[in-house]
Amino acid sequence: MPKKSDTREKVLDAADGLLQEGIRPTQQNVRERIGSGSITTINSALNNWWQTLSDRINRKDQHPNLPEPVISAANQLWDQALAYAHHSLNKEREEIQSLLLARKEQGSAQIEQLRSTVDQLQQQNTRGRTQSDELKEQYLELQKKLMESETALIRATSERDDLHRKNKQQEIIHRHSMANTAAHSASDDIVSNPGQSEKLFEARVESKLNIIKINELTSQLQSKSDECITLKEILSSQERGSLQQQHRLELVIAQQDTRYDEALKALTDCKMQLSLAKK
């Protein structure tokens, strides 16, 4: 290895000497001047000599009074500085690329996490809205059932009142008939008028049947009334529960909307950072 380095130095010195003599350095005349060395080594060194010739001439022109050893040492120092700068630049470039890769991986992981969070929030919002709709449907169904019960209660009340009225009318007729019978004060007259006795008997039977029916209707009315009261209580409780549930759902949805907006903003910022990092 030192022999090769010596050959390169000899080639450079020989080329400088030939150039000072006004002769163009070539592989042949350089080899003749140094007396030894392979053509490959001479060719490589000569190519390097031609590449650095312009810089060395410029340096000599800029500092014509400097001795050659000083210029040579300065050139070596400058070359070392350039080599160190290139090495530092490459090292810094590798560190930056490694940092960008790490930030890209971290950003990709954050994006996936944010997307997962956004999907979960959307699903929670959907479930919350579905629950709210179900509660509204239950509330409307209870209202419908209560309305039907109240309608049946009104109908039964009307029917009971009609029976009460008919029963009173029959009682009046019955009392009137009894008064007429007492006015005649003759039992044979009653016997001689079997049609009137039959009517009185039918009126009494119908009156008793009406009383039985009135009692049944009264019982039904009480049952319907109790049912309406129960439905109203259930409806009131359901309404309060529905309002509370709706309030909670609205609060949860509002919080989730805020988290959703924050997640979207973070996702946008992360994408922007990745885009800037790529540039």
Image (spheres, rainbow, N blue to C red):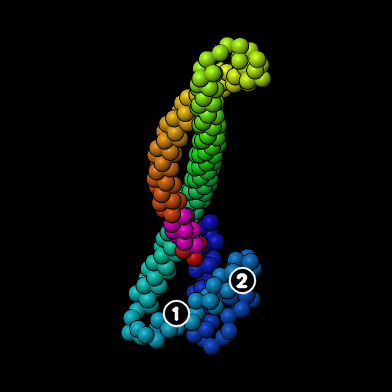
Residue 13 image offset from top left, x and y in percent: 49, 74
Above or below residue 120? Residue 80 is below
Residue 196, percent across and down? 63, 20
Q: How far apart are marks 2 and 1 (CA)?
A: 19 Å
- The percent coordinates of residue 266 (x first, y second) are 43, 54
Nearest to the eye among marks 2 and 1: give it. 1
Residue 106 lies, with reference to residue 46, above or below; the image says above
Label 1 sits on residue: 56
Q: Are marks 2 and 1 in contact (CB under 8 Å)?
A: no
Name, please, the residue furthest toward the left.
Answer: 65
198 in relation to 162, above or below: above
Residue at 52% across / 47% down in the picture?
122
Q: Position of residue 265 (x, y in %)?
A: 43, 57
Quarter holding residue 50: bottom right
- At 43% from the left and 38% from the top, the residue drawn is 239
Q: Nearer the viewer, residue 151 or 255?
A: 151
Q: In which quarter of the image is residue 202?
A: top right
**Location of mark 2 (residue):** 43
Instruction: Residue 273: say if magenta.
Output: yes
Whether residue 187 is visible here, answered yes or no, is yes
Q: Does the magenta run of residues contain 166?
A: no
Residue type beneath disc 2? Asn
The reply, left or right, for residue 39 in relation to residue 146 is right
Residue 93 visible in the picture: no
| Crowding near the residue tagged with mark 2, few <14, some 14–19, many ≥20 C-alpha atoms within 10 Å | some
Q: Which of marks 2 and 1 is nearer the N terminus?
A: 2
Q: How crowded is mark 1: few (under 14 residues within 10 Å), some or many (20 or more)?
A: some
Identity of the residue drawn at 53% across and 22% down: 180
Q: Residue at x 59, y 69 (%)?
A: 44
Q: Which residue lies furthest to the bottom in this view?
A: 22
Q: What residue type is labelled 1?
A: Arg
Which stretch appears magenta?
263-275
